[in-house]
Image (cartoon, helix red, strand yellow):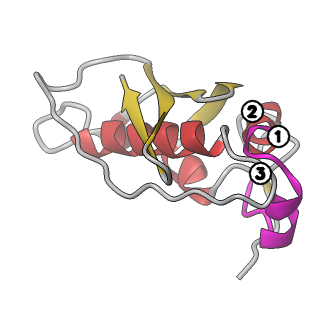
Amino acid sequence: MQEKPRPSPVNSKTYGTVSADRQQEMTGLEFVQGLVDGTLPLNTMAETLGYDVTEVVSGRVVVTITPNGTHLNPTGTVHGGLAATLLDSCMGLAIRSTRKERQSSRLLSHASRYQREPRFTTACGSASSVPWRRRMTCRSAI
């Protein structure tokens, strides 16, 4: 079901979905650039968690968030799922930004390893994609 884009209470971004037909008309870079500049709606997960897609060049995307009390786990630190969601979004959009018109992309696998608990006031995830094999892309994220 296609949702109508809703205006953001914090900025000029909107939230919703982009029709499959509209997505097919754009390159991946045009699609992600639309998320960055607000001409296309961010997904509703971005609205729920409060993150933003702030930068894109072909193969590289930056997603940012300022964690608040709703992002904490029971011990009072930022929940690892928030970081995982940011990295998932970065990786998927970085790959998407390299695709041509009518070419789709899917994130097949995502693994996270934390060396310590996340403690930050602003989080920024950045992902880059590198072509790997014929039909897959390997990506790294920080």
Q: Residue furthest bottom?
A: 1
Circle 2 is placed at which residue position?
36
The location of residue 125, given as percent across then percent down, is: 45, 26
Residue at position x 78%, y 61% from top?
102
The location of residue 28, given as percent across then percent down, is: 73, 45
**Label 2 to label 3: alpha-carbon separation:** 9 Å
Circle 1 is placed at which residue position?
30
- Dividing the picture into quarters, in which one does residue 132 lie? top left
- On whether residue 71 falls in the magenta region, the answer is no
Give the numbered dot on residue 82: none
Tell me which numbered mark, 1 or 3, is placed earlier along the sequence: 1
Residue at position x 11%, y 22% from top?
116
Q: Is residue 68 left or right of residue 119?
A: right
Residue at position x 41%, y 34% from top?
139
**Which element is circle 3 on?**
loop
The location of residue 23, given as percent across then percent down, is: 80, 60
Q: Amino acid at mark 2?
A: Val
Circle 3 is placed at which residue position?
41
Query: Nearest the camera: 13 or 87?
Result: 87
The relative height of residue 44 versus residue 56 in the rendered view (above or below) is: below
Q: Amino acid at mark 1?
A: Glu
**Which element is circle 2 on?**
helix
Query: Nearest the camera: 103 or 75?
Result: 103
**Which element is circle 1 on?**
helix
Q: Which residues are magenta?
A: 15-29
